[in-house]
Structures are given as structure tokens and as C-alpha cells.
Image (tube, rainbow, N blue to C red):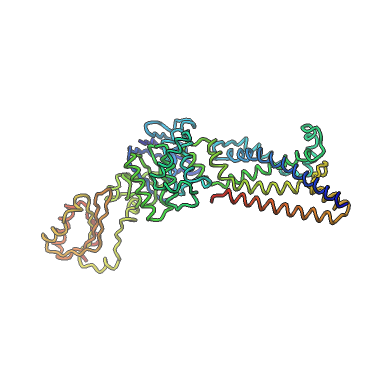
């Protein structure tokens, strides 16, 4: 659906985006995560040419948008909706007129606009707010209006630039839910920029991690969560899936402390009970969590294995063979 | 004597009203498009154009730097050319208009600059044409600021119009100068000043009300 070839965006003395090539599939929810200044916002703004890349080509729906004239870009933008962190609604216009604006931009005649706007407001759950002004709405409601405006012309792609960063957690969840629903029912490809790993975890299929204008890691959200490689990725994963043990526990340990990651099927099989039955050790569970990502379980367990050194080592080998991921945090004292 | 004075006031009031109406009308008709032009040719805007920006900007600045009383005199030949006469309130309105247009254009530009850049970008991301953005985003969003700016313009024009007497323009301010200042009729001067104070208060009050009603924030 979207293909980037060697996209570079330079400002006077800084390079915001550095030679990024990327393909985003149709119907995918693709996340781009990074800290502020990583260039993710610039990158997403290139996708509808709000920002013109200095170098490289961008294809949307098979068409090279970087080669289009201004007039054709405007037309193309009707296929690429966009929502923003601060909503950016026209404060002097009612909710109805804000949504109608998008249709006006596409040259839709008034009667059709009057029929289409209520449908859109219905879809985002704001049918009763048509006559309200943006200042009378909550943040979540404003973002819903912005979504209705972005979807007015039946776009194929929806760009979300930190769309939930100004919202409280409950509202964030509701908006993410709405985005997922839109993705499922309308088949719209969503590209989402965020600095919150939780957002990625909740709705994205794939994620790219950006740092200093480059993509440092890319993969399905499940893979990135279960085996982050780049230090930055690890940091982001830890932000939602964190296991720090108090120093005190490590110091006063009696056995070996190990972190086990359960992926996919292994997360659902009783490995700990099997181990206990097979080896003469005791296991003390220090920390544990199972997260579901795209409905697949990802479990993490920190255990302390107490017993003879021989038995512990054998048990750890046994667990490691079954789970593929075991990290010894501290050996027997 | 009293009746004469009442008549003088009535006449002066009408002259001021006439001069100002013409100037305000043109300030809006020309100043608004000029203000928009100054804004949309700025760097990073959709009609970015350094040349237009600098030429228009310089002309606006030059006119604004000329003291009104000098503008009034300098424009006498021009007024004669378009009206056939350089005397009377209509003639005075020509220089008021010339002063009012760049004054208001700058205020319009300033109120457009108050608009969040993101709102314009969001409109662009909808695929809206520059024309539609001007009509449906810039003008509605800047409306409260433009009304406030017009209030300031009208009040400034009211004070400029006092100098219209130089070209026989008449008006309330001229009355204060002729009777009150030259003839030492302090009572007349006092009354005209009070009338002017009331007028300014009234214009400001109405302007504030309208600006508030236009703002949906």
C-alpha cells in the first residue's frame, strides 16, 4: 500500500530522516515508535507530502506521490486521511461543518455532504454533537471529530501523528479501539506514530523503532516484544513489560535466579510443574506476567531455583530447551 | 446662537460619519484581501512569494510611517485627480482611506498569524485548495481578531479625522479645533471632547461585543 524508497529529509543543518526504505502492507496497522526528535513525525508527514522529502520516492496505492503536481497531490490527499495530537479542528465551525469541510475539499455537492456527515458522526459515536463547537467538546470527542473528518472521503490510508498523546489513558483506549474497528471494518491501512509502547502493543501489527532519523529495528509487534534486539527497543519494551528486581532480592538469594520468556505455545504448557516433578529442586517465583499481543500470549517469569548445583543446572537446561529463552540473572551464591 | 451651535454639531457629526464610513468601507474591501495576501505569501505558506511579500510589505510600511497630516497634504493632487476637488469631507476621506488600508491590512495579517499552523495543515491534509482554506479556515478563524482590529482602526480614524479640517473636511474634531482652540470657546471644545470620548467608548464596546460573539473558543 505504501512504499518508501530511500527517503531523506534534510533541514538547514539537520537531517531529520535518513535514507529510510519501508513497505507497509494493505490493511496493516503499522506503528512507528521513537522519542521526540527521532524523525518519526517528519517521516509520517512525508507520507501525504505535508513535508516534501529531500530525496527518495514515496508510493501510495501504487502511485508515486513524490512525482505528482500540487493539484494532483491535493486529490491524492483525499485518499490519505490524517489525525493529529492536538486535533487541529476549525474552532469557528461546528462539528458538522468541520467534517463537511473535508467533503467540500473533495468537491462533494451540498446535498451529498448533508447526507454523509451524519453517517460519519454516527460512526465515531458523536451523532448528537453535530451542532456543538470544538471548544465545547472533550479531548476524546475532538479526536473523534478529527477521525470523522479524516475518513470523510473514504481514504485508503489513515495517518495518526501522536493521535492519543494528548489524551488520558481511558480515552486513549477508546480511541485506539475505534481505530482498530475502523481498520477491521473498512480495511483502511493505518500508520501510527507514537512514543508510547502501550499504544503499539494494543493495536499495531508491525512496528518500526526509530532513532536519529533511522529505523533501528523492525518486525511484528510480537517478535519485537518477545525478543527486542536494539537497546532502544529493549527500553521501549521494558516500559510496558518491565521486570526489575529489588537489589535486596538478588543479594539475599539462596539459589540461581533466572528469567524465562515463554512465547506462543510454550506459554500455555505447564513447564514449571514438569520441572519440579523431574528434578529435586524447589522453585520460588519472584516475578511473573503474561501479556497478550495480537491475541498471542507472551509470558515472562523470574524464578529462583534452590537445590544442589547439579540439579539446578540440569533443570535450567531442561527449561531452556523447552522455552528457547532463558536468561540467568544471578548464579547460585 | 445656541441653535447655530446645535446645527454646527449636527453638520460636524454627519461629516465625521461620512468620512469614516468611506474609509472603513475601503479599509475592509482592500485591507482584508491585502492582509490575507501578506499572510499567504509568507515563508512556509501555500503562496510563499518573497517578492510580493517584500514589495507589499514595504509599501504598507512606507504609508504607515507618514504622519497623517502630511499624507493629507501630499495626497491633494491625487484627490483632485479622482474627485475633481480637494476640498470637503469626501476629499478628506481619500487620505483617511489611504491611511486606513495599510493600517487594517497589518492588523488582519496579525490576526491570521494567530491561527494555529496545525489547523491550516490539517485542512491541507484533507486535500483542500488554497482558496477553500482561505474562505473556510483563515477567515472564520481570524474573524474575532479582525473585528477587534477593525475597532482599533475605526478609533484611530476618528482621531485622524480631526485633522481633516486642513482640507476643509469638517467633522467633530475640526469643530473642536476651530471653535474651541482658535476662538477660545472652551465650552465647545469641552463638549466635542466629551462627545468624542463617548463615541470611542461606544465603538470599543460594540467592537468587543461583536468580537466575543464571533469567537467560538
Whether residue A43 is visible: no
In depth, the one of A153 and A211 nearer the eye is: A153
Write the residue at 34% across / 37% down. Answer: A23
Q: Residue furthest left?
A: A278
Q: B165 or A72, which lies in front?
A: B165
Left of A52 or right of it: where is A307?
A: left
Up-down relation of residue B91 to residue B156 (above or below):
above
In the displayed structure image, the side of residue B195 where residue A214 appears, left or right: left
Residue B71: x %, y % from top left: 77, 41
Quick one: A174 or B102, which is closer to the camera?
A174
Image quadrant of residue B86?
A: top right
Q: Residue at x 32, y 50 (%)?
A: A202
Q: Is residue A266 left or right of residue B197?
A: left
Rendering coords of residue A133 (x, y %): 50, 49
Image location (x, y in percent) of residue A310: 13, 62
**In percent of the image, x 74 and y 44: which residue is there?**
B17
Tell which residue pokes out farthest to the front in this image: B3
Amino acid at each position: 500500500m505504501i512504499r518508501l524508497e530511500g527517503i531523506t529529509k534534510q533541514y538547514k543543518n539537520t537531517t531529520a530522516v535518513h535514507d529510510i526504505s519501508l513497505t507497509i502492507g494493505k490493511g496493516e496497522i503499522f506503528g512507528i515508535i521513537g522519542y521526540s526528535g527521532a524523525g518519526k513525525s517528519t517521516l509520517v508527514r512525508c507520507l501525504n507530502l505535508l513535508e516534501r522529502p529531500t530525496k527518495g520516492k514515496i508510493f501510495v496505492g501504487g502511485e508515486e506521490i513524490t512525482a505528482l503536481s500540487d493539484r494532483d497531490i491535493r486529490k491524492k490527499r483525499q485518499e490519505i486521511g490524517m489525525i493529529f495530537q492536538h486535533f487541529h479542528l476549525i474552532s469557528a465551525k461546528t462539528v458538522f461543518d468541520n467534517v463537511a469541510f473535508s467533503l467540500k475539499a473533495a468537491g462533494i455537492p451540498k446535498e451529498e455532504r448533508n447526507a454523509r456527515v451524519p453517517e460519519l458522526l454516527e460512526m465515531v459515536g458523536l451523532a448528537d454533537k453535530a451542532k456543538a463547537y470544538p471548544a465545547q467538546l472533550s479531548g476524546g470527542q475532538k479526536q473523534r471529530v478529527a477521525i470523522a473528518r479524516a475518513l470523510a472521503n473514504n481514504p485508503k490510508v489513515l495517518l495518526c501523528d501522536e493521535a492519543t498523546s494528548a489524551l488520558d489513558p481511558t480515552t486513549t483506549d477508546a480511541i485506539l479501539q475505534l481505530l482498530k474497528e475502523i481498520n477491521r471494518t473498512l480495511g483502511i491501512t493505518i500508520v501510527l506514530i507514537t512514543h508510547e509502547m502501550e499504544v503499539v502493543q494494543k493495536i499495531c501489527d508491525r512496528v518500526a523503532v526509530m532513532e536519529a532519523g533511522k529505523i533501528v529495528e523492525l518486525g511484528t509487534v510480537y517478535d519485537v516484544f518477545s525478543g527486542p534486539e536494539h537497546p532502544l527497543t529493549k527500553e521501549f519494551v521494558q516500559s510496558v513489560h518491565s521486570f526489575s528486581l529489588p537489589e535486596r532480592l538478588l543479594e539475599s538469594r539462596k539459589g540461581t535466579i533466572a528469567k524465562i520468556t515463554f512465547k506462543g505455545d510454550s506459554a500455555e504448557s505447564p513447564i514449571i510443574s514438569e520441572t519440579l516433578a523431574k528434578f529435586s529442586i524447589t522453585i520460588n517465583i519472584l516475578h511473573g506476567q503474561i501479556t497478550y499481543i495480537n491475541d498471542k500470549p507472551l509470558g515472562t517469569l523470574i524464578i529462583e531455583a534452590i537445590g544442589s548445583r547439579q540439579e539446578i543446572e540440569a533443570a535450567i537446561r531442561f527449561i531452556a530447551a523447552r522455552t528457547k529463552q532463558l536468561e540467568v540473572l544471578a548464579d547460585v551464591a | 446662537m445656541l441653535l447655530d451651535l446645535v446645527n454646527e454639531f449636527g453638520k460636524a457629526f454627519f461629516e465625521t460619519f461620512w468620512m469614516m464610513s468611506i474609509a472603513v468601507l475601503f479599509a475592509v474591501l482592500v485591507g482584508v484581501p491585502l492582509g490575507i495576501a501578506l499572510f499567504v505569501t509568507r515563508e512556509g505558506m501555500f503562496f510563499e512569494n518573497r517578492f510580493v511579500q517584500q514589495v507589499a510589505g514595504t509599501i504598507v510600511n512606507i504609508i504607515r510611517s507618514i504622519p497623517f497630516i502630511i499624507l493629507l497634504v501630499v495626497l491633494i493632487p491625487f484627490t483632485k485627480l479622482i474627485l475633481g476637488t480637494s476640498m470637503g469631507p469626501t476629499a478628506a476621506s481619500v487620505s483617511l482611506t489611504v491611511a486606513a488600508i495599510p493600517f487594517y491590512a497589518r492588523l488582519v495579517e496579525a490576526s491570521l498569524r494567530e491561527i494555529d499552523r496545525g489547523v491550516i495543515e490539517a485542512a491541507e491534509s484533507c486535500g483542500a485548495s488554497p482558496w477553500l482554506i482561505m474562505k473556510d479556515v483563515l477567515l472564520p478563524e481570524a474573524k474575532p481578531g479582525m473585528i477587534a482590529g477593525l475597532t482599533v482602526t475605526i478609533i484611530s480614524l476618528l482621531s485622524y479625522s480631526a485633522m481633516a479640517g486642513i482640507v476643509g473636511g469638517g467633522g467633530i474634531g475640526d469643530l473642536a479645533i476651530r471653535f474651541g482652540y482658535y476662538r477660545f470657546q472652551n465650552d465647545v471644545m469641552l463638549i466635542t471632547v466629551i462627545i468624542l470620548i463617548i463615541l470611542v467608548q461606544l465603538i470599543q464596546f460594540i467592537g468587543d461585543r461583536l468580537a466575543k460573539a464571533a469567537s467560538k473558543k
